[in-house]
Amino acid sequence: MAGGWGKSLMSQVAGKGKSLMKASSGKGDNPEDPARIEDRDVLASARRRKQLAREAALQREEERLRREAVAAGAGPCGPTRDLQLARSTLPHADDDDDHNNNPDNVDTDEEMEEDDEPADVYQDRRGGRALPFPQLPGPAYLEGPCEGGPQNYEFMRWFKSHIAMYIWEGYERRETTRCESRTKALEDYRGPQDNTMIARLEATGLYHLRDCFLKRMNKNLMLAFVERWQPETNSFHMPWGEMTITLHDVAFILALRLDGPPVSEIRSVEECSQSLASVLGVGLMDTNEMFRNKGVGWVKVRDQLTLPSTTDEKKMKGYLMFLLGSVLFVDKTTCNMKPWWIHFTNDLDNVGKYSWASACLANMYRQLGIATRAGMNNLCGCVILLLCWIFEYFPCFRPPLSRSYAEFEPRCRRWAHGGGNKTTLQEYRKKLDAMTERDVCWTPYGTGAHYLHPRSMYYGTIQFMDIVEPYMPDRALRQFGRNEYANFIDLSQYREAWLPETVAEEYMMWYIERTHRFISNPDRVPPAERVVAAVPPDQPFANDIARLLVPIVFGLTSDDAAEAFLSIQPQLRDLLTPHAHYLRLLPRRGRGGGPRTRGRGSRSGQ
């Protein structure tokens, strides 16, 4: 349920709380004071009464609608659309606005859009943010083939509530949709400066996250890819097939550990609250309130950890907690975090032994799935991972390279900025619809880079706390240099893809019937112009070519070199294909599948 629903009710409760706190201003600042505890009990009782009233009203409305259905001669069935609307219009006592009542809300990142609603967005009677479009008629699931796909609807029954379905029907996502990041927090709070503490933090394998951020994050580009994410398969459904974020993507982009036990141990709220109170040096009542509400703000964390009385041990534990909440597990509380993982960061000797890459990816899969639902206006999780993944595989969207980047650093630091520009979401959407598989750099880290991280070929589930998501790299084998359709995937079963964008014909026949390949409806939106050929990959591919050619050129006679060259011709063809397309030296295929040949001299100056 959207965060703004029930805003009026919570405003009333918050107003009562403010009045009570003003009246108790002379009672002292001790959180254990009986008078202050009584005030909190009053607020809790008010919320509970409102919740009980809502449940009773909902039961009465359900009973009334069922009687009307029976009187009209309808048989017993599931909730009708009228009942669904009745449920949604009743105020909910647990709903609150994600960006209000937040004293630490000072994160004014450059990439964040203003949170003001456009004048034409409907505001409902409760004062919350309403959907900019109505609910589609009928049940929330598909009952038959859908225009534009899928035709075989059994595979994606819940596609009807997907944002792509609404866009196809002519509705549009609101402009205030946010992609949550903590750039300002990471810039302002750089952690302990003592060399001994820095060395110990580096030993955890997580300290480098302090530099894993980009300014000017391209929100519209990320949202264009969110519209193509399908939670049923945990993959992006593109016009040419499926792509996904793999474990070796996480390893290269964020330099996180893949091996190790999962981040799965869950502690109770009381234990997490006690740990947070110990690290920050605040009262237990305060941390209890943080976990009940929006969590602890990064400004509060910074201020408490930089106090002279804070021990070195607490500074290190607190900073690791801050890094995980600001990079890997970002939530929608603007600049707060609820550190349910604090028991991991409190163990400085063992925190680096866990598989943080799989935890980050599991959480990102879940957040992408949530963001695809119509009406959701936040993308949470590790958005830097999503954005840099796009840059790696889609060279036409890449920003300039950073001059300070050095090889073997996390690849998220390769870019000078996050690619933010004035390109609209609608323009990105049409560009993706017009692209083909030849505009993709399928192996951005090198043809065999996934062998450096064998766990990336694992097939099963990945976990972060109570989030368990399927991990199915066999759905995107082209990203492993294979073209067909397994605890570990045995890639020897699959034919190598030369050229890498090729795919088995039977796969595309299966795929087209079961997905929604294009987001923009051609009956409503004019098609985009053809996307300019992707800029070819840079240094890593040049290194790969050198590794292949140097032993032949410098180590063999002319007769042996000719034979050796023929043996490496397939690898060279793979490496040179992006450059050949960029120079327009090879025939291309348009959106309709017809060949479009371009001569060698068609690109001037090359």
Image (spheres, helix red, strand yellow):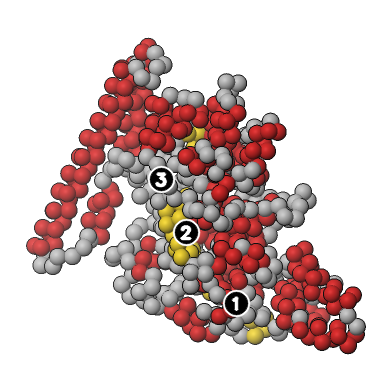
Precedes in sequence: disc 3 or disc 2: 3
Placement of the C terminus among the 4 image quadrants:
bottom right
Residue 322 visible somewhere in the drawing = no
Give the foreground label among 2 and 1: 2
Q: Residue at x 51, y 45 (%)?
A: 330
**Which mark identifies residue 482?**
1
- Pick out the residue farthest to the top: 26
In primary-sequence order, the first of circles 2 and 1 is: 2
Coordinates of residue 236 in the picture (x, y in percent): 51, 66
Q: Residues within 10 Å of mark 3 (few under 14, many from 20)?
A: some
Q: Badge 3 is on which residue?
A: 266
Tell me if label 3 and label 1 are in contact, CB under 8 Å.
no
Report helix, strand or loop for mark 3.
loop
Cα–Cα span, label 3 and label 1: 38 Å
Rounded to the nearest angstrom, the CA distance separating label 3 from label 2 is: 15 Å
Residue 267, picture quadrant: top left
Q: Residues within 10 Å of mark 1 (few under 14, many from 20)?
A: many
Residue 300 locus on image (x, y percent): 52, 29
Question: Is residue 246 shown above or below 103?
Answer: below
- The amino acid on which the numbered mark 1 sits, given as a three-letter code, is Arg
